[in-house]
Image (cartoon, grey):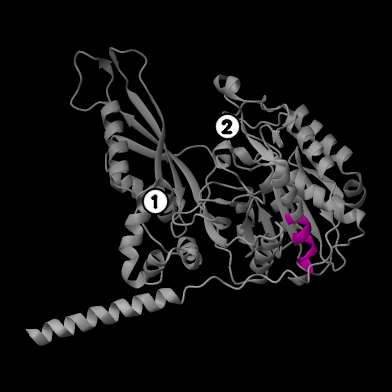
Amino acid sequence: MKRLLLALLALVTGLGGTMVSRAARLVPPLPVDTSGLPPMPSIDSAGAIQRLAGAIRYPTVSYASGAPIDTAAFRGFHDHLVASFPQAHATLTRELIGGLSLLYTWKGADAAAAPIVLMGHMDVVPVPEPNLPQWTHTPFSGTIADGFVWGRGTLDDKSTVLSSMEAVETLIRSGYVPPRTIYLTFGHDEEVGGRYGARAMVDTLVARGVKPGLVVDEGGFMASGLLPGLTQRVAIVGIAEKGYISLKLTSRADGGHSSMPPGRTSVGALARAIAALEASPFPMSLDGPTRGMLDAMGPYLPFSQKVVMANMWLTTPLVQRTLAANPLGGALMRTTTSPTMLTAGIKDNVLPPEATGVVNFRIRPGETSESVMARVRDVIADTMITVAPLDSAIANPSPVSSTRSPAWALMRKTISSMIPGEQPPVIPYLVMGGTDAKYWGPHSDAVYRFLPIPLGDGDRERVHGLNERVAARDYASAVTFFIRLLQGVGGL
């Protein structure tokens, strides 16, 4: 027995030593060498803020309900771009795609080199009428106050459109000629799926033989406290995004008077179906982008957490339980199930012959819309319920872009140079929402999602929420990001 205990003690000691040794090898990568960067041209920061504020004043709203959009607002926005960036419009070719989307072409010195695509979208989400009194400044005022530009679109996503145009205008004035062709694609319907804007522009360019060496769209962020265990400011860059499908569940039964209900009602069957889906969530997995995110986070965590991350061969169940304890962590590991709409009945004493519900699923890489539908039908297993896709955008998860490519190295170097004196950790990330970048997935292996604006406390909640705003100094960082990115594309 004594020998057995000694053997067990030696095993545990050796295991512990191995785990600690592995954790000790988790060290941050060397800082990016930014000493050889080309000179930064002078940026008209004050003018840039005025031009962004002017763009916010156009109510370019997309309505998920399918309500008509204000086409005059979009055309006014187009005219604002023309007036704001004369050098860009004199140098680049501009095309109108899908009625209201804009495709700009900046021809490069080497027409054979793989081009670059910078994406953004002009449309914004509506502001609910009851929320209007809660706005410090009205949503489409473009007010400049207290060091901020206020209004819908300052973060999502007119800031990307305007800052990339500011970069192009600045570089043209400095005499810069891109070594490869640059495409700027600004969609008009990203907030409702991008089917007539971004998809049409991608189809147009693909038909012309375009295969980008790098695509950059919104999606990730730079902020503190973005990921569990990381308190310092980091930049999370989307290397993939989840798929999307909404399924309509329809339950049918005999109607009639509520005083004589049958054994099963349409409402009861629908309620049981939704309860079954919530009680049987999709399985968790750390494979793919989420595992890459955890590996990249490891060197920046406290040592006790490094021990866990460095020994995933043993600690995976613990990591999964820890992540699943909050909605963000759970969404990173599984396809999510979200009941969003219910409809049934016309009167309190009438049994409805039909009840419908809509359940939205955000599909993790490794699963598909088809596999989601099959699993939903298996879980419900009720002949009273029919399951069909809602007539809305359906998208499978995007391909996963590499973090070992020259394009990723350029993204990391650009982020490292956008704020003087600061090099935040750059962490790959699975984007849980949808972006227009998904349409490039089949055509490029270097699609990255990053909003180059450092976010302050509460700013993430302002996206699609109350009091959306951007700090003037942070907007200047976005302009710097795009200038540095374009200056570096020759190295791809």
Is the magenta region chiefly helix, strand or loop?
helix
Instruction: Check residue 485 for magenta coloring.
Output: yes
Instruction: In the rendered structure, find residue 49 and report the number of the disc placed on it.
Output: none
Residue 285 shows in the view? yes
Quick one: label 2, few (<14), some, or many (20+) residues within 10 Å? few
How far apart in space, not on screen, are marks 1 and 2 (Cα)?
A: 26 Å
- Disc 2 target residue: 64
The question of residue 303 being in magenta is answered with: no
Residue found 58% across the figure and 23% down from its top? 134
The structure residue drawn at horizontal position 35% and vertical position 49%, both measured from the top left corner, is 325
**Residue 432 placement (x, y as % from top left):** 50, 49
The residue pinned by badge 1 equals 330
Q: Nearer the viewer, residue 345 or 34?
A: 34
Q: Give x and y (percent) for residue 28.
A: 54, 70
Range drawn in magenta: 481-490
Observer-nearest of 113 and 207: 113
